[in-house]
Image: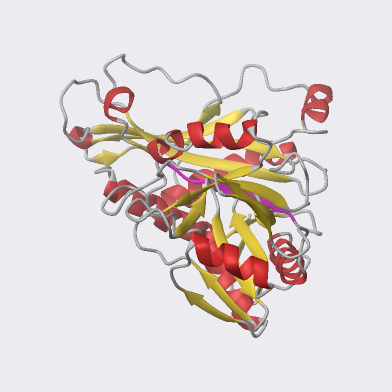
Amino acid sequence: MQLTRLPHPSPTPAAALESLIADPGFGTVFTDHMVTIDYDEALGGWQTPVLGPREPIALDPAASVLHYAQEIFEGLKAYRHPDGALGLFRPEANAARFNASAERLAMPALPQELFLGAIRALLEVDGEWYPAVEGGSLYLRPFMIATEAFLGVRPAKRYKFIVIASPAGNYFKSGAKAVSIWISDYTRAAPGGTGAAKCGGNYAASLVPTGQAFAMGHDQVLFLDAVEKRWVEELGGMNLFFVFADGTVITPPLTGTILPGITRNSLVTLLQEQGLRVSEAPYSIDQWREDAASGHLVEVMACGTAAVVTAVGKVAGPRGEFTIGAGGIGQTTASLRETLVGIQTGRIADTHGWVTRM
């Protein structure tokens, strides 16, 4: 990939960098550089990528993204392997989902080679920001915004694609214990909407219900379907799996209202390899409550790029609360997390071709 490189006027000193990555948390520390690629319909589309200092973006006040929310993003992690190399987990799937989101938001498709090349270029200069903490990774955030300045409802003709990176520790402050979730009365997405796209509006709509969950002492929020308000869909940023005593597993189907998670897709494969029977089927909140009470439901897993695989121990809502199993991390959840993280970090052989080494 051809690339224009701009020098950084004041890179972070080694001592300051070491302090920043000692305990980075999630999403608050950022590396020195970013990659940008401009799109201009009048100039024939995507322009030459630029690797330069991470810095504020200059936007006209009439930029379309600020008024009509043409914006999409992805999230993926780079992991340090035992030999020192960095590896990405299924980045081609992120590139494909990015373009699916772009299509839904009337934005231009980004060639996969540009998506992957931008990430590779950023890791080459900022790989030293990898945090040597338990559960650490280098989180990558590719995103695209509409930059054309105009007022009027139509697709923009100019865009900017950017990749930034953030050293990350554990996603949940509570660490690896099972999480507690709150059943929201709000709706995340409706049929025919943008629920399957990874766009900021979906996440903005989840902020109030997520804040309510936090205020009541829970870790995440659960959304039900928009039509009947009884079918389980997903958490604020994670897909769900239900593991039963008879060796079956259910995950809500991809009907266009939930995000098609890459971790979700990977877990389906790993569960099947463990001999469990996985089905994509509707699952109601009432059935969840009944199955938890009877002991038929033994584990619930939440999964996503940021949290990887996390057990759900307690569910609460206006009708009271209930616990799954003993309220802790079950055997299947622990085994799947160990296997998936092992593949991502190069400690377990990748027999699926999921890992791309940088």
Question: What residue span does the magenta drawing correspond to?
Answer: 72-80
Instruction: Give percent across and percent down for residue 267.
Output: 60, 69
Where is the C terminus found, in terms of image quarters?
Answer: bottom right
Q: Is residue 208 above or below residue 181?
A: above
Instruction: Give percent across and percent down for residue 318.
Output: 55, 44
Residue 79, magenta (yes or no): yes
Residue lying at the far top of the rendered structure: 61
Instruction: Give percent across and percent down for residue 164.
Output: 55, 35
User: Does the image show residue 189?
Assistant: yes
Q: Main secondary structure of the magenta part?
A: strand
Residue lying at the far front of the rendered structure: 319
Say left or right for 88 vs 346: left
Say left or right for 132 vs 28: right
> 180 or 267, which is in the foreground?
180
> 224 or 97, which is in the foreground?
224
Q: Is residue 344 above or below residue 291?
A: above
Q: Residue at x 40, y 17 (%)?
A: 58
Q: Residue at x 24, y 20 (%)?
A: 149
Q: Is residue 289 above or below residue 165?
A: below
Instruction: Give percent across and percent down for residue 284.
Output: 47, 64
Q: Residue at x 40, y 64 (%)?
A: 254
Q: Residue at x 68, y 79 (%)?
A: 245
The quarter of the picture where residue 297 lies is bottom right
> 219 or 30, which is in the foreground?
219
User: Does the image show residue 354?
Assistant: no
Q: What colour scheme was applied to this rendering of the protein?
A: secondary structure
* Number of numbered callouts drawn: 0
Say left or right for 27 vs 282: right
> 327 or 7, which is in the foreground?
327
Residue 43, magenta (yes or no): no
